[in-house]
Image (tube, grey):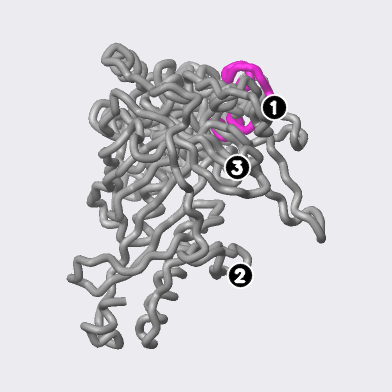
Amino acid sequence: MESAEVFDVTTVEFETVIGLEVHAQLLTHSKAFAPVTTEFGQAPNTNVTPLCLGHPGTLPVLNENLVNFIIKMGLATNCQIAPRSIFARKNYFYPDLPKGYQISQFDTPICHDGFVDIELEDGSTKRIRIMRIHMEEDAGKSIHDQDPYHTLIDLNRAGTPLIEIVTQPDISSPAEAYAYLTKIKQIVQYLEICDGNMEEGSLRCDANVSIRPVGQKKLGTRTELKNMNSFRNVEKAIQYEIERQTRLIRSGGKVIQQTLLWDANKLETRQMRSKEEAHDYRYFPEPDIPPVIVTEKMLESLQASLPEMPDVRFKRFKNELKLSDFDAYTLTDSRYMADFFEACFKEAGNAKAVANLIITEVRRVLNDQALDIRDFSVSPARLAGLIKLKEADTISSSAMQSIFNAMLTDDRDAETIARDLNLVQVSDTSFLEPLVDEVLSANPDKVKAFLSGKEGLMGFFVGQVMRNSQGKANPQLVNKMVLDRINALKGE
């Protein structure tokens, strides 16, 4: 590396340069170029056709939704959309690629020169430029851990439509990489073009990592990291590679351009192939698929179909609904969570009360049961009914908790459950007045002490009334009635 000849590498400070390549598997009902389902979890080698298997004489037909989805992604990430783009054949030989080539795009990507803004740990934002987003089909899957002697091949995934999102080398730390991936996942989920599940392989990431002395413009020799199946593993793998390259250079060695696999169990990388062993893909235009033409009418239609994006929704929740940054960020992190909140708010009318219940209780249940908000058993309308009971002082805070827990397995409305559990607060003053008088009459010494300044005794009076009402009294109303009655006694 050039820096080893110019700088004293034992004392120089290094900076990190990272570029990410993200593959997103699209939620189309059929494959990119063949009329066969893309449903996940089917028996191996059942979602296949002669085209997926590379049989001679088969011709690909472009899935229209593949084009629509990638244009939506391009628009959502501020990309330029090419009016004309072509497919190419990416040639390489591997057991899970029966055609011997992958249909992709090379020098004419459909989306290019975009950006996304990420939020950094200190609250500031940073712009990450997107070099290109292109369309391609996925390969099959090689399975190495089910047979001790053989690699098994499942071609269900072969031909599944993908988009590849390639950044400029603008990312400077593992934390920034994590923030960028989180943003990309959020965008594809808001657009409903990908579920963003790294564990199931629907979102995959490769990272190109290099280091260079601070102030040097020339990039260092990069390595490519693969096999990272979670956002945290991406962060850990990049951190490991930064430290490995730094140790190597400080000890007088040189970084070799190579592809490395991340071992999540050992928390280390291992070599996959070096630059000399890398494939020469011999790209050439795909002769069986015509150019993709994007008209202004298409762009206008797709632009109009975009949902409110997370950054815009965050600002609206914060500015119009007066939610805190934390509440607005938490609720807009997922489109479906934000939709649930808005549906509940529309019924209940109190944004802060709705946000509090969702962020504390609903998310607790989702985390405990590993559920998505779309699978939550309580509808927004039923949850709003519970909030309205509390807002009207019909139930207490503790009763609200009990009713919420009951609603998880009981599909009745909150008010019915509250009455069934005898949790409805009494706010009838004609019922409460005798109870208040009884408590004050039975404790004249405490009334006198309260009047002399021991205001902490109010809790005692309210507690006694609550006990005598068997917990049914509205404590806020009891508090007011006790104070009014004591003031009346003082006047007497």
Badge 3 element: loop
Q: Residues within 10 Å of mark 1 (few under 14, many from 20)?
A: few
Label 1 to label 3, Cα distance in Å?
A: 14 Å
Q: Which residue is mark 2?
A: 266
Q: Which residue is mark 3?
A: 100
Is disc 1 placed on a helix, strand or loop? loop
Nearest the eye: 72 or 123: 72
Residue drawn at 81 percent across, 60 percent down: 148
Query: Residue 404, percent across and down?
Result: 58, 30
Disc tally is 3
Residue 372 x %, y %? 57, 34
1 or 3: tag closer to the N-terminus: 1
- Callout 2: helix, strand or loop? loop
> Mark 1 and mark 2: span between their CA atoms?
40 Å
Inspect the image, locate mark 1, and give the three-letter code of the amino acid beneath it: Pro
- What is the CA distance from the residue labelled 2 to the residue labelled 3? 33 Å
